[in-house]
């Protein structure tokens, strides 16, 4: 990453330039809450929340389960999950840069 003020190279995680001290613009809005396309058990809601918060998906699933089991929470937990399933967009699948494996031909 380069400093927006002086143009010198700085570390990716820097909030300020070590050379000139200028505040670096952070993309706080670049992170979106989406359903996970890679870590999903039912619809990817808990996996997406875990990706957004930076925690293990199992922790989110356990918390959701515990909150849903309490009396009166089952209906709320199920409805909240269904609502999140409908409202949260599905995350785009990132394709790898590796080429697809070559299939052997039948004529060989």
Image (spheres, rainbow, N blue to C red):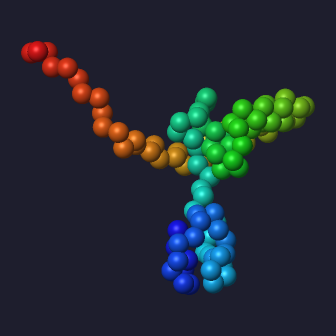
Viewer-proximal residue among 96 and 68: 96
Viewer-proximal residue among 61 and 28: 28
Viewer-proximal residue among 78 and 26: 26
| Res 40 seen here | yes
Q: Residue furthest right?
A: 71
| Res 84 seen here | no
Identify the residue at image location x=84%, y=32%.
66
Q: Quadrant of residue 21?
A: bottom right
| Image coordinates for residue 22, horizontal then vertical, percent | 64, 82
Identify the residue at image location x=78%, y=31%.
62
| Image coordinates for residue 49, horizontal then vertical, percent | 67, 45
**What is the count of numbered marks?**
0
In the image, residue 9 above or below residue 44: below
| Image coordinates for residue 5, horizontal then vertical, percent | 56, 84
Identify the residue at image location x=52%, y=45%.
90
Q: Quadrant of the C terminus?
A: top left
């Amino acid at each position: 990453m380069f400093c927006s003020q002086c143009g010198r190279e700085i570390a990716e995680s820097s909030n300020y330039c070590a050379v000139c001290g200028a505040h670096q613009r952070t993309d706080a809005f670049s992170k979106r809450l989406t359903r996970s396309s890679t870590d999903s058990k039912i619809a990817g809601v808990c996996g997406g929340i875990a990706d957004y918060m930076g925690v293990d998906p199992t922790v989110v699933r356990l918390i959701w389960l515990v909150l849903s089991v309490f009396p009166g929470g089952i209906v709320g937990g199920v409805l909240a999950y269904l609502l999140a399933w409908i409202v949260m967009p599905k995350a785009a699948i990132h394709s790898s840069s590796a080429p697809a494996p070559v299939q052997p031909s039948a004529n060989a």
